[in-house]
Image (tube, rainbow, N blue to C red):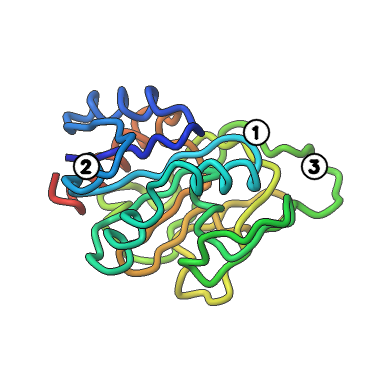
């Protein structure tokens, strides 16, 4: 089963509904027992970096989350702010991130384009990864964000998206993946991505 982590941040119901439309069994996990039985985990997130990290800390779920992801290597998918929390730090705040990926979260530079980056945009697939199996080279997804992830190494950049410049719109490091866009709002490609994640997690 896919378990969506409930730490008080994110649109969990929308993700669960999209997974169910994709034919995937999914539950919302609020305690250690629910995470213990998960075949794959989704870390959602909307809002600001520091409050999200504080909520994750106070949820009491971090010890089991670290064990399941870093030691037992079960698949994890971070969505939007959930992807940014995987990095070492963010321009948005002062609290350290999880640091599970060698990356940082930075604000879009001053430019003529509107921030936040909001709406539909393409993602260019850079690596052969099961998350984007059976998709065209540039599928379209829905974005809402003012910050983006900057990876230290190109080997972690799964897709890029143009918005003033090319930025990392999804990443991979072993069993850990993150997407800056919202698959739960992205119609057929979002449904396909979540189904691919479930297959990756063998759920």
**Which residue is under mark 3?**
113
Name the N-terminal-most of marks 3 and 1: 3
On the picture, is 45 further left or further right than 147? left
Q: Does residue 17 appear left or right of residue 178 in this picture?
A: left
Residue, disc 2: 33
Instruction: Please report the residue visible at 55 percent of the width from the left and 44 percent of the height from the top.
Output: 81
In this rendering, the label closer to the viewer, 3 or 2: 2
Depth check: 178 or 196 in front?
Answer: 178
Residue occupied by mark 1: 118
Q: Residues within 10 Å of mark 2 (few under 14, many from 20)?
A: few
The residues tagged by marks 3 and 2 sit, at their Cα atoms, a distance apart of: 45 Å
Q: Position of residue 167 (x, y in %)?
A: 62, 58
User: How far is the residue under mark 2 from the one under mark 1?
Assistant: 36 Å
Find residue 34 and report its image quarter: top left
Q: Are marks 2 and 1 in contact (CB under 8 Å)?
A: no
Which quarter of the figure is the N terminus placed in? top left
Mark closest to the chain's N terminus, 2 or 1: 2
């Amino acid at each position: 089963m896919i378990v969506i982590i409930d730490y008080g941040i994110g649109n969990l119901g929308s993700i669960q509904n999209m997974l169910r439309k994709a034919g995937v069994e999914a539950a919302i996990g609020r305690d250690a027992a629910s995470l213990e039985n998960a075949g794959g985990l989704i870390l959602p997130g909307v809002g600001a970096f520091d409050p999200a990290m504080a909520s994750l800390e106070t949820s009491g779920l971090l010890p089991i989350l670290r064990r399941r992801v870093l030691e037992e290597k079960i698949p994890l998918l971070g969505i939007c702010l959930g992807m940014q929390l995987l990095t070492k730090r963010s321009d948005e705040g002062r609290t350290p991130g999880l640091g599970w990926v060698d990356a940082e979260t930075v604000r879009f530079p001053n430019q003529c384009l509107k921030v936040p980056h909001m709406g539909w945009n393409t993602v260019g697939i850079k690596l052969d990864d099961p998350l984007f199996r059976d998709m065209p080279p540039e599928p379209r997804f829905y974005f809402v964000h003012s910050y983006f992830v900057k990876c230290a190494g190109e080997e972690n950049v799964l897709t890029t998206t143009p918005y003033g410049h090319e930025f990392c719109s999804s990443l991979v490091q072993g069993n850990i993946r993150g997407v800056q866009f919202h698959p739960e709002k992205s119609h057929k490609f979002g449904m396909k991505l979540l189904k691919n994640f479930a297959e990756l997690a063998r759920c």
